[in-house]
Amino acid sequence: MLTTLLVVGLALVLGLAANRLLRPRLVEDQADALTVRDFMEPLLTLAVLVLAFVMVLAAESYGDAEDAAREEAGVVDHLFEVADFAPDPQRVRLQADAVCYARAVHDIEWPAMVRGSASTAPSVWSTDFRKQLKGVDRQDAVFGILIDADRDRSEARQARIAESTPAIAPLFYWFMLVTLAVTVIVLAFCLPLRRFGTELATLVVLTILLTASLLIIHDVDRPFGGIIDVPATSIADASRDISDDFVAAHGEAALPCDAQGRKPAA
């Protein structure tokens, strides 16, 4: 970073020195000089490129969050189904842990992600799930399937939590905001002094579009806390399906958690 600052600063100093010392000797006084308008095109190009780059970055983060949430819901549903083939001493508890985990993600951790944080509630049930797995014979074919599925669930959850935080650093967002502000100022400065109604209307529309783009980027960069958020549809559907199946087979009283996935106080 220091090297970049030094090189750019040195380039500016050398350019200004050349302008004052060499230009008068090499260029006639009548030669055209740069005006503010000459800086408009590169400045506008820079603003658009920065916007495009950040928009792609935010969109990728949003897509990854959506994929992770969908994958996690699918894995939890798969865990519940495979656990049905586990030995009797562990089968019911493994399925109950899957139900409580899904409830905790939907009712506790999802609202926490909206606030930019996570929750330990789902970890209670994933930990108990692995504890119950220790009682399953390792030679049993279902053991390996459950281990793989639990690993996939853990990775999907970690990805979901990671994507809940902004991918764009605050410093970069402020740089983008300043770039757009300077662009608008320069464009407004270059408006004609008279009869500039059409140009002014165009500038207002351009300013609105640039501002809207920046606001959309800011919103999409928060996949679980913005207006354009990742809905909890997948985990809600999975939680409802496996809860209905479990309750139909064993009853609500067999679950070690409440309707929100919380472990009752001892």
Image (cartoon, rainbow, N blue to C red):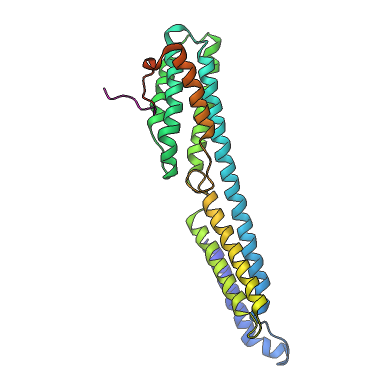
- Residue drawn where x is 63% and y is 85% of the image: 193
> In this picture, which residue range is highlighted in magenta?
260-266
Provide the major secondary structure of the magenta segment.
loop
In this orientation, which residue lies closer to the viewer: 46 or 102?
102
Magenta stretch: includes residue 263:
yes
In this orientation, which residue lies closer to the viewer: 136 or 180?
180
Q: Is residue 69 above or below residue 90?
A: below
In this orientation, which residue lies closer to the viewer: 195 or 66?
195
Q: Is residue 2 above or below residue 148?
A: below
Percent of width and height locating residue 65: 55, 40
Q: Is residue 215 above or below residue 186?
A: above
Horizontal side, residue 75 vs residue 19: left or right: left
The residue furthest top is 88
Percent of width and height locating residue 176: 55, 62
- Residue drawn where x is 56% and y is 54% of the image: 216
- Residue drawn where x is 62% and y is 87% of the image: 20
In this orientation, which residue lies closer to the viewer: 194 or 119?
194
